């Protein structure tokens, strides 16, 4: 049996965590990061991911990815990379499991619609909504709102894609309101990079969605098998499988090719990350945060091929006419619900009936927490007709 290697010097260390906003006693059986992961898994918002869309609207088929299955795939890849790089697997897994909690119903379509609805107020950002859930909206404890997760987990969730403030910020725009509000009481070092574990979760997200969107696109018939054979990365994998297993069904070819691609991308990330770490030689986790650049990433060659693959997916899957039709119908649902709740807060449960300037955020929180099917049922209840035909 192979036993885990000791953590690298630059790994996050549960025994020296910066702690929680509200102090708690330690567990006798779990590290702080393991407790964080368990709290995420038991959260209501995590269970709701089962019925939230990834690309395809939930009623279109039972075999397409949802936010839940996507998060589980990201967590599995994160653990594999973290283990190989001798990082804290539990922290990487926790951030991966939590990273999509703030997504509203109907995937990025729902987010686009909520952004429109909230443009005159404090705006909407799914990453900020995740922080809002973890620190305020989840109510499972008597002593505090939210889940009271460790500094490292919250930092990783907020910054897994890079710094949000200062000269290294990936976007030159104001901080989302929820992040700015929370940072005022719990400094998450928004102008630095996050831990390696958070960076692992971010690149694992890329690996997972690029591969499962190819898989789902092929199974849905949005991508032809012939065009897939000419794609960057995907085509070579398909040809390899067909050569190794002549005559095997297309379903098996697709599954084997996706598995091979995930493995190749993981190996590429590990090799590139080791090269960067060897160059910088960070002495601890804080040195990673101050490094001035991401330490976990794809190689330039892999990035180029992924860029071309994403361009194909954008044109042929995300903007396919059938997906676009459902996107517009889903946007109409979100917009209509927002307008109705703003005009008539009595249409919402009592707990969400905020008044005055607090009403838009309460309406946004309520809609963002909905699953696809609950949003569709609410639309039918309020307007007397079924959406998403």
Image (cartoon, grey):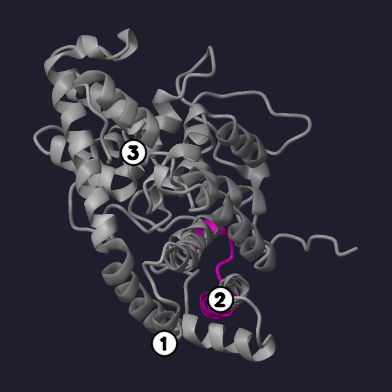
Q: Name the side, left or right, on which 224 lies relative to 376.
A: right
Q: Mark 3 points at which residue?
A: 104
Residue closer to the observer: 347 or 302: 347
The magenta region covers 267-288
Which badge, 2 or 1, is on the more N-terminal residue?
Answer: 1
Q: Name the residue under label 1.
A: 230
Q: Name the side, left or right, on which 162 lies relative to 236.
A: left
Q: Position of residue 325 (x, y in %)?
A: 22, 52
Q: Name the side, left or right, on which 197 lies relative to 331.
A: right
Residue closer to the observer: 160 or 236: 236
Q: Position of residue 249 (x, y in %)?
A: 62, 76
Q: Which of marks 2 and 1 is in front?
A: 1
Disc 3 to disc 1, C-alpha distance: 34 Å
Residue closer to the observer: 268 or 310: 310
Q: Mark 2 points at which residue?
A: 261
Quick check: is 281 in the magenta stretch?
yes
Check residue 264 in the rendering and tell me which mark sits there, or answer none. Answer: none
Q: Residues within 10 Å of mark 1 (few under 14, many from 20)?
A: few
Mark 2 near mark 1, Cβ–Cβ under 8 Å? Answer: no
The image quarter containing residue 263 is bottom right
- Vertically, is 197 above or below 351? below
Which badge, 3 or 1, is on the more N-terminal residue?
Answer: 3
Q: Residues within 10 Å of mark 3 (few under 14, many from 20)?
A: many
């Amino acid at each position: 049996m192979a036993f885990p290697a000791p953590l690298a010097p630059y790994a996050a260390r549960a025994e020296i965590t910066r702690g929680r906003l509200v102090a708690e006693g330690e567990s006798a059986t779990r590290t702080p990061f393991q407790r964080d992961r368990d709290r995420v898994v038991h959260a209501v918002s995590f269970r709701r991911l089962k019925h939230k869309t990834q690309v395809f609207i939930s009623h279109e088929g039972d075999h397409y990815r949802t936010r839940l299955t996507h998060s589980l795939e990201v967590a599995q890849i994160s653990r594999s990379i973290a283990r190989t790089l001798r990082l804290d697997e539990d922290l990487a897994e926790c951030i991966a499991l939590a990273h999509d909690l703030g997504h509203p119903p109907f995937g990025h379509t729902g987010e686009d619609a909520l952004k429109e609805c909230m443009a005159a107020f404090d705006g909407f950002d799914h990453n900020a909504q995740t922080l809002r859930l973890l620190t305020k909206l989840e109510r499972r404890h008597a002593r505090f709102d939210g889940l009271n997760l460790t500094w490292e987990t919250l930092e990783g969730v907020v910054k897994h894609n890079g710094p949000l403030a200062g000269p290294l910020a990936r976007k030159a725009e104001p901080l989302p309101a929820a992040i700015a509000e929370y940072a005022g009481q719990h400094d998450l070092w928004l102008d630095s990079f996050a831990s390696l574990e958070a960076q692992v979760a971010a690149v694992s997200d890329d690996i997972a969605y690029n591969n499962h969107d190819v898989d789902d696109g092929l199974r849905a018939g949005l991508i032809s098998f012939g065009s897939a054979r000419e794609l960057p990365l995907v085509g070579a994998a398909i040809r390899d499988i067909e050569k190794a297993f002549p005559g095997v069904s297309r379903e098996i070819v697709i599954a084997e090719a996706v598995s091979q691609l995930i493995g190749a991308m993981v190996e590429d990330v590990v090799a590139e990350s080791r090269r960067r770490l060897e160059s910088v030689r960070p002495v601890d986790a804080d040195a990673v945060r101050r490094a001035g650049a991401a330490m976990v990433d794809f190689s330039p060659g892999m990035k180029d091929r992924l860029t071309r693959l994403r361009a194909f997916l954008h044109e042929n899957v995300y903007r396919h006419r059938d997906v676009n039709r459902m996107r517009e119908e889903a946007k109409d649902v979100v917009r209509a619900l927002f307008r109705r709740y703003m005009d008539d807060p009595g249409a919402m449960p009592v707990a969400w009936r905020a008044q005055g300037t607090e009403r838009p955020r309460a309406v946004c929180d309520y809609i963002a927490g909905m699953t696809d099917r609950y949003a569709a049922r609410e639309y039918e209840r309020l307007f007397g007709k079924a959406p998403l035909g």
